[in-house]
Image (tube, rainbow, N blue to C red):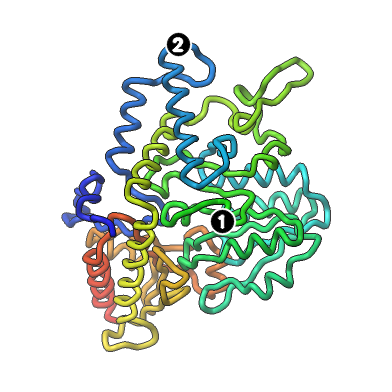
Amino acid sequence: MLNVSKIREDFPILKRLINGKPLVYLDNAATTQKPQAVIDALVDYYSNHNANIHRGIHTLAEEATAMYEKARERVAKFIGAKGAQEIIFVRNATEAINLVAYSWGRAFLKKGDEIILSESEHHSNLIPWQLVAKEKGVNLRFIPINAEGYLDLKEYKRLLSTKTKLVSIVHISNVLGTINPVAKIGKMAHEVGALFLIDGAQSVPRMPIKVEDLECDFLAVSAHKMLGPTGIGFLYGKKHLLEEMPPFMGGGDMIREVYLDHSLWNGLPYKFEAGTPNIADTIGLGAAVDYLEKLGMENIFKHEKMLTEYALSRLSELSYPSTPLGAGLRIYGPKTTENKTGVISFSIKGIHPHDVAQILDKEGIAIRSGFHCAMPLHQKLKIPATCRASFYIYNTKDEIDKLMEGILKAKKIFKI
């Protein structure tokens, strides 16, 4: 298990006081905090190596290029890709999914084809497909979720057909914390000749991931949810698929030869990285991967499971509809950690989630309230919004106890 006390020393922001109280940061599904090692990597690059990459032959340019490409190699190893060419750097998971939608989708989808998503998708794995579907005359199909927050795989099997060209599914729901059986979903997609994309924004930061085991053709990830800087992420894609896809954007560095009437594209991965990239934050991502690997992803996964189990136990003391404490709290999604981790969304009868979040903030506790970029899922659940507490490597049981105390204070304020 993790030495959380030692880990917390690596995160400067955890020393902050919010409203005079120690920060309890439980909004990790939105973004994680940054260890000093990542901050130092950014400062070191700008202080000692700042230069543009791939173009210059002077010392700084060569140093910066080597640091940037070393980060790509770290990421490839981290997720078990066959080579660094399969890692495309983008701004975030949203851009990674858009890259596939607009490059692969525009090139290979035709009228009457079908894409299968689920009712629990983040907007970033819904809107790009809506846009492409409208443009290409493609039909979107949706795997429903049941009352416990699991995908209905029997309905998924029924939806699959020779018309299915892509299945795109979230690995861990950012609202329900459900761990979807992506390997099974991917295998079923491949059996009808469809490709499979995984939104790994929540899973890659908190569990061991090897793309070969996931049966995926594409994997989208944001660095800022795995201790890295904002504004950087990556798309994993199988090499043969990336080679077939046209460029996503045009400009410098994605070309091999340029003429007035035509151009020849660069090879992988540079074909998809037009212009000066986010060099510093890519290097910061490499430092984040190093930090996570030192802790061990299996250890991180076990720590989150432990916290989630404890939080579910504590919150159930207030569970809906009535308990001795009478808070009327309802948890959405799985109620055990068998197929759930790190994310718990809940509501309290009689108190709007925004009010809960504001009261908790007065206690120094940061949670998220709202739709969490998953409005269709909330519509399915027939609720206007939820509170969401999400955990990571530096969180403790004591912080969950403080969350409970904050909820009870909200209950007292609203006389519930």
Q: Which mark is residue 262?
A: none
Label 1 vs 2, first from the N-terminus:
2
Q: Quadrant of residue 21?
A: bottom left
Label 2 is placed on what type of residue?
Answer: His
Is residue 141 shown above or below 244? below
Going 46% across and 45% down the picture, which residue do you hit?
A: 78
Residue depth check, mark 1 versus mark 2: number of the one nearer the observer: 1
Circle 2 packing at 10 Å, graded few (<14), some (14-19), many (20+), is: few
CA separation in Å, label 1 and label 2: 42 Å
Q: Nearer the viewer, residue 327 or 236?
A: 236
Where residue 346 sits in the image (x, y, percent)? 40, 72
* Residue 399 vs residue 373, the one in the foreground: 399
Q: Is residue 70 left or right of residue 147?
A: left
Which quadrant holds the N terminus? bottom left
Q: Is residue 395 left or right of residue 344?
A: left
Q: Position of residue 150 (x, y in %)?
A: 55, 73
Which mark, by number, is residue 58? 2
Say whether residue 240 is left or right of residue 347. Answer: right
In the image, 102 versus 302, the foreground residue is 302
Position of residue 254 measured from the top left corner of the image (x, y, whole percent): 63, 26
Q: Residue at x 16, y 55 (%)?
A: 20
Residue 74 or 38: which is nearer the viewer? 74
Q: Which residue is mark 1?
A: 213
